[in-house]
Amino acid sequence: MVEAITRPTEMTISLAAVKNNIEVVKATSGADKVFLAVKSNGYGHGLHTMAEAAVAGGVYGLAVAIIDEALALRHQRLTVPILILGISPAEYAELMAVQHIMATVVSIDWLKIAEQHLSGEQRLPVTLGLDTGMGRIGFRERAEVAEAIAFVQAHADKFEYVGLCTHFAESDSSDTRYFEKQLKRWHALTDGLPKPEYYHVANSGAALYHPNEVPHEVIRVGTVIYGIEPSRGELADGHDLMPVLSLRSQMNFVKKLPAGEGISYSHIYTTSEDEWIGTVPIGYGDGWLRSLTGFNVIVDGQYVPIVGQIAMDQLMIRLPHEYPLGTTVTFIGVDGDLENTVEDVAQYAKLAPWEITTGFHERIHRILVD
Ligand SMILES: *Cc1c(COP(=O)(O)O)cnc(C)c1O
């Protein structure tokens, strides 16, 4: 893993915020147990940093997309339950069983292949995934679900029937028709079939906005724990959530330019008078997108704009006057009375907040703070 500790560009993850957000979602949803989704490098917040924060914050388990992410967590010596949300090759069943990693199963064929690969020394915990309308992965027929449960139960020496789950395509909108349709299908597919240890169906939207309609003993959430209100203001203001991520750097070059000087590639910005220009070592190679030129970062408690094209590793800002080298530049976070949130950045770039965070590169140093 590349972590640029030799560069003053740093992401801090607030443990207090993670803990607060876990409490908020538990209180709102009535959930006993929370699986925190830390897939894709913890939504860009750092897999290991987020996993450490989540465990300290009392989550029940961690959810990832692929086996590699699960193994990275086991190498971190975390012993909490780990759920893989996506399809894992059935040939890896024994590896998952040994590492006690729960597989999401979406076909009978998968179970048959996995059964061949399991020695029976360790049982593979499985959750059956149902497609109630996301249209992505999962069983769609009740007879197939029943057959899968029967197969798992008939091979109880190799499989452990832990979960039944589904995923909502639209749980954070004021238009609830599609959500209700999926919920109806969920009941049609599962009511009366043998119950696993637990159901887990709620993502952030369902946990926050439909807590009483869905089974909520166990929930699978990401967005809300990262301090992002999933409906983006439509259903709630999100003021009880705390931002988790701050992103800061320091100026490492400061100069005064006369009028008429071009800044960065293609000179899309030219000074119009004597201007103080600061250079900051962060760029689109870190996930600070080129479309963020013009966005206001915070220096010394005031907004200053990014000027010129953002380069791969560096960018320039226009300063009101000279500042010493090493002056802090806040891209996301609080400085004085001002604050930039992930949502502010996303709005400026016309992207979803989780697209912004997921794009932050591994070379940004991440640290967990109280
Ligand atoms: C990512 C993911 C989640 C978490 O979703 P949020 O909306 O971030 O809470 C839950 N379930 C599945 C299947 C996922 O892929």
Image (spheres, rainbow, N blue to C red):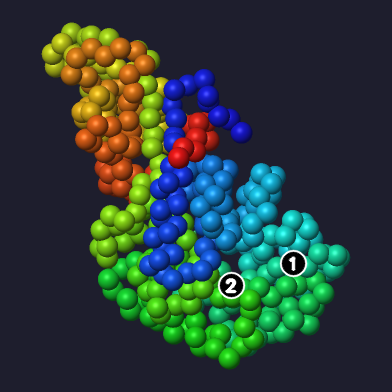
Q: Residue at x 61, y 88 (%)?
A: 193
Numbered tag placed on residue 142 in the rendering: none
Q: In the image, is residue 352 above or below residue 176?
A: above
Numbered tag placed on residue 124 in the rendering: 1
Q: Residue at x 24, y 32 (%)?
A: 336
Provide residue 354's location: percent of width, then percent of height. Answer: 40, 50
Provide residue 237's location: percent of width, then percent of height. Answer: 25, 58
Q: In the image, is residue 97 above or below residue 339?
A: below
Q: Which of these two is toward me, 203 or 352? A: 203
The answer as to whether callout 2 falls within 8 Å of ligand 1 is yes
Indicate the quadrant containing the C terminus: top left, top right, bottom left or bottom right: top left
- Residue 109 lies left or right of residue 241; in this view the side is right
Is residue 311 visible to the viewer in this orientation of the structure? Answer: no
State the SS at label 1.
strand
Q: In the image, is residue 24 above or below residue 366?
A: below
Circle 1 packing at 10 Å, graded few (<14), some (14-19), many (20+), is many
- Residue 284 lies left or right of residue 303; in this view the side is right
Three-letter amino acid code at the position of disc 2: Gly
Provide residue 40's location: percent of width, then percent of height. Answer: 53, 48
Numbered tag placed on residue 129 in the rendering: 2
Front disc: 2 or 1: 1
- Distance of mark 2 from mark 1, alpha carbons? 15 Å
Give the image quarter of residue 245.
top left
Three-letter amino acid code at the position of disc 1: Leu
Q: Residue at x 80, y 78 (%)?
A: 155
Q: Earlier in the sequence, mark 2 or mark 1?
A: 1
State the SS at label 2.
strand
Q: Which of these two is toward me, 11 or 361? A: 11
